[in-house]
């Protein structure tokens, strides 16, 4: 059900991307400097391959539709919708809204895997997604691109915050653009406890009390963009998150799991 809902969201919201491992905004290459000319739309279809690390959830493969929009100030890129206050060749500052579909539905987890971690699945609650609001800042130049996001849960799902920092550098490869990146993400204790810990209501039912507290999650990734003809483009990206001990030791995570990955490949058409 969660995966079905995700596909619907991807086709009706600002795309929907990513589980907790990646940012589908990478599927929408940006132009340097302020947007000129009429607004541009892009529509496409792709495939997601994801392993979140949750016990028994396994690797999921599913097709998804997606949409992007670039206006003079307003844009939609994957999970993110933004309004640029500053936008020039070297710096961009924007207010953003970002859909978070981290979490899980208990029905999607493995009963045996949870039992091996000492958890009775019948005592668990779903972990819901939400909407984060905040700021995004990007510095661009010959050194590459440095981006930071400061976000807070606006839906009272986890009532937490998230801060991320990512560095990327673009290379021309043939007729395409290859962009490796490294990043780090900080989750406040409320966010980490909600998605990787056990809830107080679950503990009251007899589930082990586990609270990881605030955590830092490093990541590496790569994206690739290549025009195909005048209107079409191939897009792809992959991210791998290195789960810290505070997360990998959670009874909600598959045993001996130290990372989570997200891969997306697809084609888009500009209008």
Image: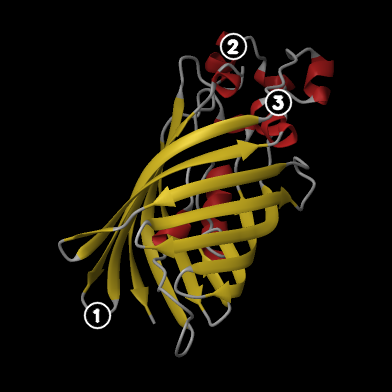
Among all residues in the image, which is located at the extreme bottom?
A: 37
C-alpha span from label 3 to label 2: 19 Å
Residue 126 screen position, x and y as percent: 69, 34
In the rendered view, would you say 236 is above or below 22?
A: below
The residue under label 2 is 117
Of 95 and 250, nearer the camera is 95
Residue 224 screen position, x and y as percent: 29, 56
For the point 74% across and 41% down, which residue is it? 160
The residue under label 1 is 230
**Element type at mark 1:** loop
C-alpha span from label 1 to label 3: 49 Å
Residue 219 screen position, x and y as percent: 45, 37
Q: Quadrant of the N terminus?
A: top right
C-alpha span from label 1 to label 2: 53 Å
**Mark 3 or 2 closer to N-term?**
2
Of 97 and 181, nearer the camera is 181
The residue under label 3 is 213
**Element type at mark 3:** loop
Closer to us: mark 1 or mark 3?
3
């Amino acid at each position: 059900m969660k995966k079905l809902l995700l596909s619907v969201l991807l086709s009706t919201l600002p795309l929907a991307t990513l589980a907790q491992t990646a940012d589908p905004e990478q599927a929408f290459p940006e132009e340097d400097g302020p947007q000129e000319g009429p607004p541009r739309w892009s529509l496409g279809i792709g495939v997601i391959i994801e392993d979140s690390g949750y016990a028994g959830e396994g690797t999921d493969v599913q097709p998804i539709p997606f949409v992007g929009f670039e206006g003079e100030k307003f844009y939609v890129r994957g999970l993110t919708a933004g309004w640029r206050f500053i936008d020039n060749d070297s710096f961009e500052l924007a207010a953003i809204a970002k859909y978070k579909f981290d979490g899980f539905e208990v029905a999607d987890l493995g009963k045996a895997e949870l039992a091996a971690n000492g958890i009775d699945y019948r005592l668990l609650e779903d972990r819901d997604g939400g909407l984060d609001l905040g700021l995004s800042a990007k510095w661009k130049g010959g050194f590459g691109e440095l981006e930071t996001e400061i976000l807070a849960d606006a839906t009272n799902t986890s009532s937490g915050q998230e801060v991320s920092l990512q560095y990327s550098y673009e290379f021309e490869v043939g007729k395409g653009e290859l962009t490796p990146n490294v990043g780090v993400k900080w989750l406040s204790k409320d966010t980490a406890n909600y998605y990787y810990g056990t809830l107080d209501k679950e503990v009251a039912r007899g589930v082990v009390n586990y609270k990881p507290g605030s955590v830092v999650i490093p990541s590496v990734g790569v994206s690739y963009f290549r025009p195909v003809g005048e209107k079409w483009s191939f897009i792809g990206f992959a991210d791998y998150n290195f789960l810290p001990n505070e997360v990998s030791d959670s009874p909600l995570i598959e045993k001996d799991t130290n990372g989570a990955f997200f891969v997306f490949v697809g084609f888009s058409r500009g209008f």
